[in-house]
Image (spheres, helix red, strand yellow):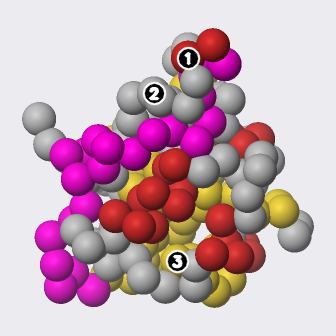
Amino acid sequence: MDYPVYVVTAAVGEERAGCLVGFAGQVSLQPPRFTVWIFKANHTYAVASRSRVLVVHLLPARGHDLAELFGGLTGDEVDKFAATTWEPGPGGVPVLTSAMAWFAGRVLDRADWGDHVGFLLEPIDTVTALDDRPLTFHDVKDIDAGHPAQPERGRRDELGRGDR
């Protein structure tokens, strides 16, 4: 199976965070709803759990470097936004300028299902410029997680469990 991966960003005041996620998808047509699942150990989870809005970015296939930045490094140690171009979006949440599409979603609910929490989003703003195929799971399998699931396992982990 292959599926798109996303970079999700969040902000509370001046604190920003973002991670690569592989667990995400549309969950309702009417009303429109989308859910992203964020690993609880991520720096991004701590910020997202306090954010009223999240921005979900679809990366182009040539966006491996951006996926590596947001999936291979942890916001506990690195300011990821200093290494890429972005602008403030709805709610002050960073919008990555190199994304091929993005939407901002108001957080309606959260569901704790183990090591990940699902954030139910109501889309409030969308930008699309689909001029390439999206970056997929198979494109990013080589990225070592920036935030390991279990410290004794080191930096390597499966998609959806690192600081993504």
Is any atom of residue 12 visible in this view?
Answer: yes
Total numbered badges shown on the rendered structure: 3
Q: Are marks 1 and 3 in contact (CB under 8 Å)?
A: no
Residue 8 x %, y %: 53, 57
Q: Looking at the picture, which amino acid does disc 2 mark?
A: Asp
Q: Point out the stretch of residues depicted in magenta.
A: 129-151
Residue that mark 2 sits on? 157
**Which mark lies nearer to you, 1 or 3?**
1
Q: Which mark identifies residue 153?
A: 1
Badges 2 and 1: C-beta atoms under 8 Å apart? yes
Viewed as shown, does residue 99 lie left or right of 19? Answer: left
**Residue at x-position 88% and y-position 67%:** 13
Check disc 3 and report the residue beneath it.
96
Residue depth check, mark 3 versus mark 2: number of the one nearer the observer: 2
Residue 155 lies, with reference to residue 114, above or below; the image says below
Q: Amino acid at mark 3?
A: Leu
Quadrant for the N terminus, please.
top left
Percent x, y for residue 139? 23, 53
Residue 39 lies in the magenta stretch: no
